[in-house]
Image (tube, rainbow, N blue to C red):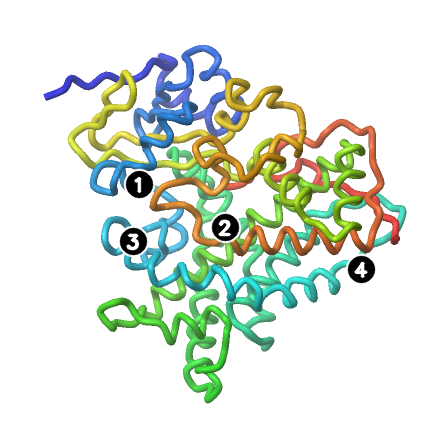
Amino acid sequence: MTAISLPPGPRLPRSVQGLLYLSGRRRMMRRSRRRYGPVFTLNLPVMGPSVFVADPVLARAVFAAGASVAGKAEPNLGALLGPGSVFSLDDDPHRRRRQLLSPLFHGKRMREYEALIEREYAREAATWPENTEFPILPSTIRIALNTILRAVFGADGEELAALRQLMPTLGDAGSRLATGGAIGFARGRSTRARFDARRAEYDALIEQLISRALADPGLPDRADILALLLRNHYEDGKAMSHSDMADELATLLTAGNETSANTMAWTLERLRRHPRALARLVDDLDAGNDEVLQQTIWEVQRVRPVIGTVSRQVKAPSVELGDWVIARGHRIIVSIALIHGDEAVYPDPEVFDPGRFAGGRPDPLSWLTYGGGNRRCLGSDFAETEMKIVLRCLLRDFELVPTTATGERMRDRGVAYMPGKGGRVALRRR
């Protein structure tokens, strides 16, 4: 057997490393990268020795490994989203679920959601003040949440109104639990109790919506995701259980809302501080193009990744990773943020430059916003469509006033990174 050989890392006690990681994940990873190189080990409570990868070639090897070699990490968000979430599945059940869900987020389906996204933008934009600075993140959260709720359930009603109130509090409690719970630090019984209570409310609402949809004579013609899930079946003819639907819809609502809302806020935060990039983007949009808009979104996702890491867990007896041999049960964590900030991959990585993507799509080896391999984000096309429509409409209707203020810090919400001040903007109607 090959001898186990872990990369170097700090020798501090596990509890101390856990506290440092909890208090500043990005800071600890950057310091470890500088001291130990692009592959290093942190010893964290619950997770144990965890190998962090900041090398794109080795990251590709991690993503290319099959589920029997490097599968889903434990614990993960599935502990909050439920056993029926795609986050909780691995091997063949995971493959079958992705086959069932993938057609819901591609091609024609995305075009059907475009008018819906624009309506939600217009509804929110009507509330914005002019010539007064305000945080845009609450607005992008409402746009993203209302869009995904309508796309998922297809109609208004008492249950949807209740979900609009419920989902932000459920997501907030889940975010508070996610990081602290993952590394063994209690976030308080009150947070867990609040999360469990909100989740019970959510499950009851979803069951009501499923019952209403099944009784709807127009179900065969509906295009919302709930209707599609009720009509679709696995390759063996079996339908998804109602509890699995609730878990999967919770995954769509929370993951989809968090990432796209924060990326839109970060885009506006970055553009206000880079007036030349802003002017170039507006000129391109006014000419009827969206190439620069797409490049801008890619660059924002590179320099301000909302999700900083993705994880796998070694399932084989051992895995060779470059010069190292990782034992079964160890977690391998690919650092999106460190790879995106590697000057060997992206020259002048701290510089915001959408033009670096003018030559074509980002290299999937080194641009990892949506993860990689067989667990890459299913909703990436939906998120890209939503962000492009909202930003295009905003810059069509408003002038984004530049600022010389210092850039907002990245605030860690436990799962995602948000602008520290909510992405403050000042707008003038064009």
Q: Which mark is residue 2?
A: none
C-alpha gap between disc 2 and disc 4 = 28 Å
* Residue type for callout 2: Ser
Q: Residue 248: percent from the left, percent from the top?
A: 40, 60
* Residue type for callout 3: His
Mark in front: 3 vs 4:
3
Identify which residue is drawn at 31% across, 69% down. 241
| Residue 303 occupies quadrant | top right
C-alpha gap between disc 3 and disc 4 = 42 Å
* Residue type for callout 4: Thr
Left or right: 119 in relation to 161: right
Q: Earlier in the sequence, mark 2 or mark 4?
A: 4
Q: Secondary structure at mark 2?
A: helix
Residue 348 against residue 292 in the figure, above or below: above
Q: Earlier in the sequence, mark 3 or mark 2?
A: 3
Q: Earlier in the sequence, mark 3 or mark 4?
A: 3
Kindly identify which residue carries mark 3: 94
Q: Earlier in the sequence, mark 1 or mark 3?
A: 1
Kindly identify which residue carries mark 2: 380
Kindly identify which residue carries mark 1: 74
C-alpha gap between disc 1 and disc 3 = 15 Å
* Residue type for callout 1: Glu
Asked if disc 2 and disc 1 are in contact, CB closer than 8 Å, the reply is no
Residue 316 against residue 398 in the figure, above or below: above
Q: Secondary structure at mark 3?
A: helix
Kindly identify which residue carries mark 4: 127
Left or right: 225 in relation to 389: left
C-alpha gap between disc 2 and disc 1 = 23 Å
